[in-house]
Image (spheres, rainbow, N blue to C red):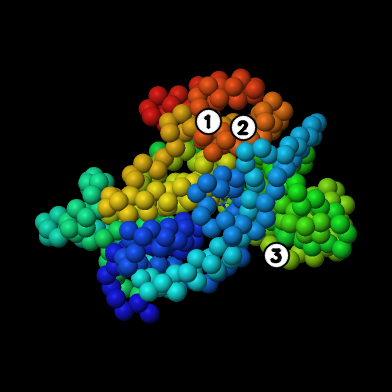
Amino acid sequence: MATNRNYDFIIAGAGAAGLSLAWNLLHRKELKGRSILLADRTLKPLRDKTWCFWDDSHVPFRDLIHHTWETLAVRFPDAQFSETLKTYRYHCVRSDDYAGKILEMARNSPSVTLLEADIEGFEFKSENPDENRGSDEIGGSDESSTSDEAGTSDKKGTAVMHSSEGPFTAGHIFQSALRPPGFHQLKLDLSLLQHFAGWHIRTEKEVFDPGTATFMDFDVPQDNGFTFFYVLPFSRRDALVEYTLFSPEVISDEAYRQGLEEYIEQRCGLAPGSYEIEYTEKGVIPMEDRRYPARYCRNVWNMGTMGGLTKPSTGYTFTRIQHHTSAIADALSRGKNPPDKIMSPYRFRVYDMLLLYNLHRDPETSVTIFRELFRNNRFDRILRFLEEHTWFHQDLRIMASVPWMPFFRAIYGMKHRILTGA
Ligand SMILES: Cc1cc2nc3c(=O)[nH]c(=O)nc-3n(C[C@H](O)[C@H](O)[C@H](O)COP(=O)(O)OP(=O)(O)OC[C@H]3O[C@@H](n4cnc5c(N)ncnc54)[C@H](O)[C@@H]3O)c2cc1C
């Protein structure tokens, strides 16, 4: 039980983003000794996610990488491509390893207090009582604090986290638990769900190649939306097989089960009963063109999924979280406020919208777009583009390699957003 009620920093939500920020704050010598409250409804390391990524430049805990693949394969009904990566590697981290290691580090740090509680809301309390009038409701958004000096905003007031264990205050709160206020009023034209179910299976037979990950296998029925499987083999006898769909609605548990059984039987030659299911995971990731605000209210910053860090066209979030939390810790260690700009650059927001438009309207054509993308480009180039690390002339080469017509249609359909800052 946390007896102290006031901290330098509160991290509200101890998932991918909250734990990464805790790690970063504990590794900045300039922030040594600053008090941190790390809050979540549960602080037990859970194995409920397997995070894959390829840009490891800001992943500080490399020893947590569970497996790395050098070769990626993609498959379509009429074509297959595979390539050994030159620049990148495809990595995965298990959520229980990640949480176990970082929570242990937090428990051993005298400056960190752990709190298991339900987080209910946030607000900013100004030292000037006049300023608090009218902003008493939990979650009132206030973007007016633009000072870049962390010390300056600390003096003007305090951020409050309301929880089932009562209120806690801090100079800065970083939250990944709650949707920002006004979420449903944010401009939204395109909204899809990336939903998936995965089985980690173990077999007697040696059927997998642990050096090659199947990045996307589209040679499967596309009846329920844009559908693919991916396979992450950890050894010759075990792999995570994941059934992924982009569609407006999730499907039933029975439909996931049936899809996984059929795929494993047809692609891996493993009939039901000939393998053990060691672990299952399920998830839903929003793929939307909503522009999330950087702050929940003054001195409360949004992070992770709640900060809008999910790339709308792919659902990849993990690497963006690592970049963001590292930038927050860098700013704080220089005595500055965290960055208010967490959105992708304009041109990448437009590309995401155009692809999302096609994924939404025309899943079949989208499979063709992906086929031509992988047929005509090196995998490293595609990954760099998805990571938003390409130059404009490189983007043009990639765009020239896929069918144009669907993108012209998407530009027309989304012109009202493209012309108003995306
Ligand atoms: C199964 C799954 C697999 C994924 N795989 C990948 C991948 O391979 N690559 C990739 O880039 N992205 C992936 N993602 C997307 C994204 O990286 C993850 O969702 C990531 O966990 C997001 O981090 P986060 O910190 O924003 O949210 P979370 O990790 O979900 O953390 C939020 C935390 O807040 C806590 N919390 C929420 N509400 C409250 C409350 N009211 N009170 C107290 N605590 C609360 C939760 O308990 C949780 O610990 C995956 C997502 C899922 C669901």
Q: Nearer the viewer, residue 233 or 277?
A: 233
Is residue 265 visible from the viewing direction of this image? no
Label 3 crowd (10 A; few <14 / some 14-19 / many >=20): few
Q: Give the vertical position of 86 relative to 8 (above or below).
A: above
Q: Which residue is mark 3?
A: 279
Q: Is residue 158 left or right of residue 87?
A: left
Q: Is residue 129 above or below residue 164?
A: above
Q: Is residue 253 left or right of residue 328?
A: right
| Residue 30 shows up from this direction | yes
Mark 3–mark 2 Cα distance, whole angstroms, equals 33 Å
The image shows residue 87 at horizontal and vertical percentages of 62, 38
Q: Nearer the viewer, mark 3 or mark 1?
A: 1
Q: Residue at x 52, y 52 (%)?
A: 59
Q: Quadrant of residue 192?
A: top right
* Label 1 close to label 2 by CB (< 8 Å): yes
Mark sitting on residue 381: 2
Nearest the eye: 114 or 334:
334
- Residue 4 image point, x, y percent: 29, 76
Mark 1 closeness class: few <14, some 14–19, many ≥20 residues within 10 Å: some
